[in-house]
Image (cartoon, rainbow, N blue to C red):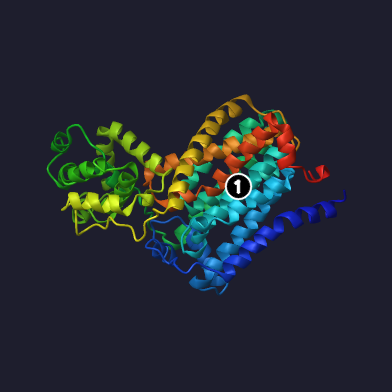
Amino acid sequence: MPVSRIFLTRMTIILPPCLAFLAFYTAFPPSDVPLLEPDSASYVDFSPARSAGYPAFLAFCRVLGLSLEQVPGVHGVLYAVSTLILLNEILKVTRSAVFTLGFAFLALANPFFNQFHFQILTESIFFSTTNLFIACMLAFLRTRTALCLAIMSACVGLALAVRPVGWAFVPLIPMIVMVVRRDVARHRSRFAISAVLPILLVVLGSHGYYKIYHPDRFDTLAPLIFFAKAGMVAVSDGEALAGAESPGTRRTLLLVLEKDLAPVRAFVAGAPSFKTSCLLLSYYEVFAQYQFATEARNHLARETGRSDALLSLAFTRLAAGWKDYLRLTLHHYACLWEISYSTTQQVLLEYLARNSPYPFEGRIKLIPDRFLDRPIHQTISAALVGVGIATGLLALLGLGVVARGDTGKGAEDLMTIVTTAVLLSLLIHGSFLLIAMTGVGGVPRYTLSMWVPMVGACGLGLFSLSRRFAPGLHGIVFRDTDRNQS
């Protein structure tokens, strides 16, 4: 079949869903989604604590003459284009229009996911970058070319520039190269450069842009994040840990973390349900980051003259309570597989009423603006747990795939599909573990950041299983498009 006809055939399959997405969300933007969230100002004004990627994107939009109200339109276009590129690769690999259209529906028609395109947050750009990364991964596994690896590497650099959780993408580059090591062995230098250089160039470019705006400083949220985590962990003898310090603000803060947050730790531990504990834990940990012992923290910085004094203090307590920090990390990780806001309003309100006055009552808001406790939300929450189990099993399989290597190549090879599914599973769980270690669980937008990888891992996993163990049924459900398209 001529190349032009192959291209047109593919476009008739993958272009309509993307155009429908743009048309629908242009005509029917959600009315209950605010353009600006509390975090938005730090991106618009380019806070020194933020990565440079999204502020640079907003600056580019301003150069084009676009207002903040018009930025969601750019979000939508970029996501539609990235999805089109991804669907093209999925169609090449699976040769199934039915599967590709099903994937398109899930990737484009999730209203909970799509609301983030309409907000001034990093989510939408991160979603688009993730789509491009997956597309390049499929293309590289299919073709084994250095160009595809280089573009994939650049996508990893973009993910790092947009959000710190982009670090979860980094280990996939050496893993993917290990999978195809037999095919790239003759050109190791070329592929090594393609794997490393684009990431470095993008990250250096991001750092250079940061230094243009903040030439004399480099701030990070790490001290606030780990200070809060230090308060959420139990230490066997926290008072003795503080007593070992010289008199001063550092000792005072260690005592404050031990004594003043002890009721919080007990209150969260006594929550009537796991979902309620996820909600309470995330709210209290964010409270500890921004509103707890702020004067003493500022005094510590002035007293020591060190910008890392708070981080050092936090690590001292976390090291003493490392076992509970592991428990806290696993708790946050499990919360990412739940929709904590799906805890019923009645359960939460009754618990708060029974324990009133609860810790820091009047200073902290523990009731969400809206509860996701309808039957559909409960169903989604249960389905997420199933996705977590399925992708967890695929991630374990992925370690074996990386160790064994893949000798197959091209759209005809089933291992391309299997390898993509297991690598996406590793990305999902690696991302959630990184968030759990350095952030909070139970926040829906953190979970939804891996929506497309979840669809890809589960969808491609089921596709490969049906093709391997039920070829007759597979042929009926996922009948091939023109085999010459690949």
Residue 465 x, y percent position in the rendering: 65, 33
Residue 113 x, y percent position in the rendering: 51, 55
User: Is residue 82 toward the left or the right of residue 478 in the image?
Assistant: left
Q: Residue placed farthest to the right in the image?
A: 1
Residue 188 x, y percent position in the rendering: 67, 33
Asked where in the image residue 18 lies, by quadrant, the reply is: bottom right
User: Is residue 163 toward the left or the right of residue 265 in the image?
Assistant: right
User: Which residue is located at x 25 percent, y 37 percent?
Assistant: 316
Task: Give the mark count.
Answer: 1
- Disc 1 residue type? Phe
Give whichever of 476, 387 is nearer the camera.
476
User: Is residue 221 toward the left or the right of residue 26 in the image?
Assistant: left
User: Which residue is located at x 17 percent, y 36 percent?
Assistant: 238
User: Is residue 180 toward the left or the right of residue 5 in the image?
Assistant: left
| Residue 319 visible in the picture | yes
Q: Which residue is mark 1?
A: 133
